[in-house]
Image (cartoon, rainbow, N blue to C red):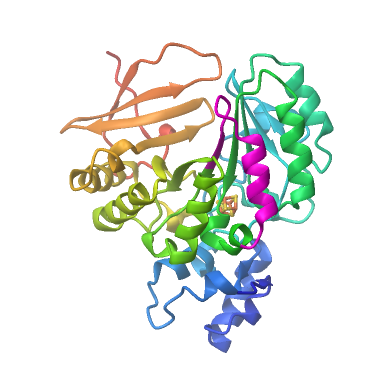
Amino acid sequence: MKVEYITSIERVDGLSKDEKRRLKRVTEKFPFRANTYYLSLINWSDPNDPIRRIIIPSEEELEEWGSWDPSDEKRYTVAPGVEHKYRDTALVLFNNLCGGYCRFCFRKRLFVKGNKEIIRDPRPALEYIKEHPEINNVLISGGDPLLLSDRRLEDILSGLRAIDHVKIIRLGTKMPAYNPYRILNDDKLLRLIEQFSFKDKRIYVMVHFNHERELTPQAISAIDRLLNAGAIICNQTPLIRGVNDSAESLSNLINKLSFIGATPYYMFQSRPTLGNKAYSVPVEEGIHIFEKAKISVSGLANRLKFVMSHKTGKIEILGIDNEFIYMKYHRTPDGEVPKVMKFERNPEGYWLEDFKPVSQ
Ligand code: SF4
């Protein structure tokens, strides 16, 4: 199948003239990008179709809420395109394109004209990583690294593999969902994974399936090819209103991921990003969905953790009782020993600051 990318909402056949006119206003603020494969998964007769919700803009995005950089990534930017927040991990942004733009993306600022956070030349990033022997883990993230040419990807992977202290390379990608043909039609890409995923230093492909309907036969074949090439596959998804905000849809997703060998890894609390209120679910509701979804799945699907990527660290959301909600830092920039934190309940709370700590 030949997949064509579409960046004008006017070219989406499933929308009426009036919808196109109204949604154009939204895309002037938050750019639109999709492709013919992913659009073909939409059931246009269902206005609440989850695939439509992921990729087609909504006027709700114009509601004022949140900020461009809710996790304050700028604070941890140490060189152009390089973030160093946790001691052993570097995050590198080499690309400001994705196979589609998720409407709820927390890095949507990258897609807006004039953003300069991306680096084209990998050398300064490689130099920084080389000078920091504590970094054993490099995450190349989105924009989607699988939209880079094989040539650029090869330069980056070979550069990282030339640094002995880099053990894990993570590729954060939604391409198996957005356009699995990027993997199915490109043996060179698979050879690169084979070449640079060693038995003692693996490449992890961090995939991003939000709903079971994205797990098409093509997507499953793409995962199979990546596994056969020697990659380890983990899935991360935010909890998104209208996409996976029921125990049933979440358990179906994590069950199917476990069947195909993609470990359900993190479910993220949606970050309070500009335009994202309508896609966000309050934390307490999220806990109920998460716990209920996990009841009916195997231990392998059950490895999912519910986390909040806060500017102060990665926080695991542990649970709730009649009075309190419990969380624990999973990782902090200064590497402090984590302790369980207790907060007053707040059914309207979306982010750490919405919860009042209780001293213990
Ligand atoms: S794939 Fe990731 S980086 Fe790209 S638009 Fe979606 S959430 Fe954002």
Q: Position of residue 248 (x, y in %)?
A: 24, 57
Left or right: where does residue 146 sit relative to residue 250?
right
* Residue 349 figure quarter: top left
Q: Residue at x 39, y 65 (%)?
A: 213
Q: Is residue 173 left or right of residue 235?
A: right
Tell me which segment is drawn in magenta: 185-205
Quarter of the C terminus within the rendering: top left
Q: Residue at x 40, y 35 (%)?
A: 307
Indicate the quadrant where residue 26 lies. Answer: bottom right
Residue 63 visible, this orientation: no
Residue 48 percent location from the top left of the image? 37, 72
Front residue of 276/265: it is 265
Residue 308 image point, x, y percent = 43, 35
Q: Locate residue 259, reporting x and y percent.
A: 33, 50
Judged from this view, the residue extending furthest toward the bottom is 17
**Image check: 100 left or right of 344?**
right
